[in-house]
Amino acid sequence: MNNRGVLTLIGLLTCSLLLSLGCSSAPETGEGKITFLQASEDSSKNESTNNPLDEEIDLLQTSEDSSKNESTNNPLDEDGSVNTSTAEPLSFPRICQAWNGVHNRPDSTTVENIARHDLYWDTPYSFDLLWEVTEEQPYQGLSTTLVDTDNDPSLTKARILKEELLRLNPNIKTLVSVEYREGKIELNENDLEWWEYGLYPPESPFWFWDTNGNPVPGWSEDANKNGVVEAEEALSGLTDFSQPELIELIAQKALALKESGIVDGIFLDWWNEHHRTAASFLDWSTFYMTQEEELESRLTILRRIREVTGDDFLILVNTNESKAPRSAPYVNGSFMELYKSDYSKGYTVEYLIEVEDTLHWASENFQEPRINCLEGWRVVYDYGNAETRITERDSEENQRWMRVFTTIALTHSDEYSLFGDDNAEPFRDHHHNWYEFWDASLGEPISSKRQTLNGIEGLFIREFNNGYAVYNRSGAEQTVPLNNEHVAISTGHISDMHLLGNLDGEIYLHNIESGHAPSETVDQ
């Protein structure tokens, strides 16, 4: 992130609330019926009272009047947009936060830990926003009007949070996740308060139903930590996003978010142009839309969003390791959330080569400004043990994988990266440590992407204002010769000759006055 030398950010990021997955109560069940799991104990049961940012925002609001008179560099213009005149140039590496954040900085505030990142997306609630509901219209999915978490239509609380994020990091881009493929479903509303209802009415035509009359599970988590996702652990219902009424709701939500001035864009999950995703999360053998229906529906969603928001509103889609050429004219980037089948292992070289190719394609073909984010998952040693996560993330093996994905992003794109938990773990996804490696300030790139060092296949190097990023998957340890002394960030080693192991990456910093250069680079 920017301003690393200006801000000392330390601390623990309290869990963001994944309202799109959490269920406040289970519906009536019977034989052959799926029970949709109640949210875990640390989830909010009343979204208006349990935002982890509330205490910080209240303190900020209390001091707002005095701070207005003390500072003339407000990062927000009068219309709520970013005042970029106060922002310093954004340095690399650039790190993104996908929903949940940092665990290993216990002395920092929640907002400070978010502000370490240069791209951040989450549910509306984490930005102190809510889709307005009333007793007469209690379904968030049907609402296209925003209020803040104090039910204030002027969004005062959300604006204070935005201003604080921009004060800490004037370059941060923020997005709200908009659900279209699945959502919280509550079948038995008799035992609930109206604000606890699901995304849509239980009888809504938006839901998909299986042959037994059950809602089709769209997402599940291994709540009992037995390594298997079971029917009673379902967290959301699958929706029919081909329906024109649902497509229009999605577009109008995007418009409301743009007009709020609180965030820079939206995030759309489950984006795939090559395979179907409209299936039960428990049984991928039965699909409820054809591949053609899914693709055309997604493209219709994008076209309609662009019709109502214009081109100056960011759209990020989750394509995993795949390209999305049909979507490219409409979106600004891909969240490359990299799946692996075995949580106890890393990634294969063959898969990394595919990832490199897709990331480079994304960095050249999506709309500007591009906001691609590459995320690798860590190796898990003790499945389901919450107490060991911070330590495991800092293992030598996981730090090596962190360097791999950071330097892939640095050598193959101009955007963001993240290294987080494996989604197989029975906890909220994407939590991560903040690594000192990410605090290195490379400045801006001054050489092109995908260059190899000395023509060695799989050994990539890129020059920045303040040094070099090098990524090695050549199959062997390699020598990195530099014309003058550079410091290797991960080891502190200072030399003009460095060794870099296979399947590893490194950042080498130099004195920017020296004008150093590597031996030879070859464009790929």
Image (cartoon, rainbow, N blue to C red):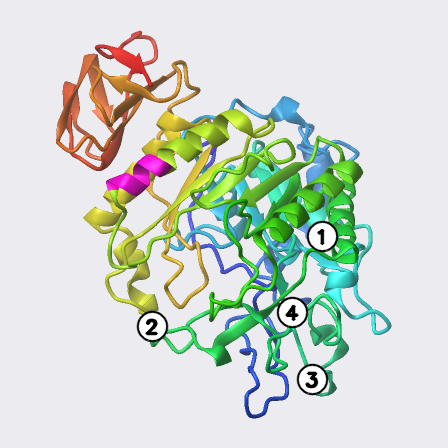
Circle nearer the N terminus (1, 2): 1
Which of the two discs, 1 and 4, labels the residue nearer the N terminus? 1
The image quadrant that residue 106 belongs to is bottom left
Mark identifier at residue 157 = 1
Look at mark 3 in the image and give the residue it sits on. 188
Pointer 1 with pointer 4, Cβ within 8 A: no
Mark 4 and mark 3 lie on one chain; the one further toward the N terminus is 3
Q: Secondary structure of the magenta portion, mostly?
A: helix
- Label 1 to label 4: alpha-carbon separation: 36 Å
* Residue 245 position in % (x across, y down): 79, 57
In the foreground, 151 or 470: 470
**Camera-side residue: 438 or 4?**
438
Residue under the image location 61 percent in, 76 percent down: 24
**What stretch of residues is rendered in magenta?**
349-354
Question: Circle 4 sits on which residue?
Answer: 208
Q: Secondary structure at mark 4?
A: loop
**Residue plotted at (58% across, 69% down):** 236
User: Between tags 4 and 2, which lies in front?
Assistant: 4
